[in-house]
Amino acid sequence: MPRPRTHDDALRLRLLDRAGELLSLDGPKALSLRKLAADAGTSTTAVYSLFGSKPDLVNALYVEGFQRFQDRLDDVPRSGDPVEDMVRLGIAYRRSALADPHLYLIMFTKAVPGFEPNDEAKRLSLDAIATLENVVRDGVEAGVFADQEPAGIALACWGQVHGLVSLELNGNLPPDFAVDAVFEAALRANARGWLR
């Protein structure tokens, strides 16, 4: 009879979420594998068994962040209207960041000095921008968006969303700021600015 598996995916996800929280709250020095294991109610052996090493754990955080992010982008139904699809993707970006702010930090900042994502992780991060770029490309080919390089339009739109989300996550918005309304209005204004 095979031994039961004690280091399952639920434990893996619990460890990743807690590791991301430790990093986002207290910085990279707080990411002790011993503390992580204690916080998650498991052993350091389980952490090593699931991830291998601390750098591997950080890479797994990066990968998990982009997988969740991509899943949320993939859940956005395409309307056939490139402007609407661009706005919907921007809203999904924000929802993803607000749902997993502890992973967003790993994905888009140098939260862990010296960390360099492996090839799989880099591919996942490029896939995320490709989702938006495909919507833009369809809009350019349909004559809806200006005859510009889709990668450039996508990157400009990504930068706007990233900037607004980063301001929100870092608490840099005025106290009574109507984030939802302004965020969507900004996305729509940006998308309309690319119209042919």
Image: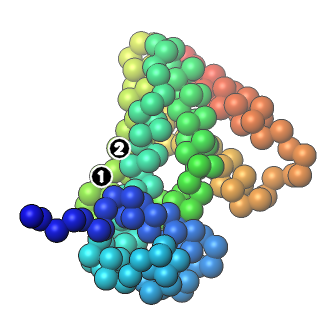
What residue is at 47 percent from the left and 22 percent from the top? 77
Q: How many badges with numbers are in the image?
A: 2
Q: With respect to residue 130, does 51 lie above or below?
A: below
Q: CA distance from mark 1 to mark 2?
A: 6 Å
Query: In terms of depth relative to the viewer, which is nearer, 146 or 130?
Result: 130
Residue 107 appears left or right of 183: left
Residue 25 shown left or right of residue 131 in the figure: right
Residue 190, given in percent of the width and then of the height, sits at 64, 31
Q: Which residue is mark 2?
A: 127
Q: Which residue is mark 1?
A: 123
Q: Amino acid at mark 2?
A: Asp
- Residue closer to the observer: 128 or 144: 128
| Badge 1 vs badge 2, beta-carbon distance below 8 Å | yes
Amino acid type at image mark 1: Arg
Mark 1 lies on a secondary structure that is: helix
Residue 36 drawn at (x, y percent): 48, 79
On-image quarter of the N terminus: bottom left
Dot 1: few (<14), some (14–19), or many (≥20) neighbours within 10 Å? few
x 66%, y 55%: residue: 166
The residue most toward the right is 176
State whether residue 136 appears in this view: no
In the image, taking residue 67 as reference, residue 99 lies left or right, namely right
- Neighbours of disc 2 within 10 Å: few (<14), some (14-19), many (20+): some
On-image quarter of the C terminus: top right
Q: Is residue 87 visible?
A: yes
Is 88 drawn above or below residue 159 in the view shown? above
Which residue is found at the position 44% from the left and 47% from the top? 68
- The answer to whether 153 is drawn above or below residue 85 in the figure is below
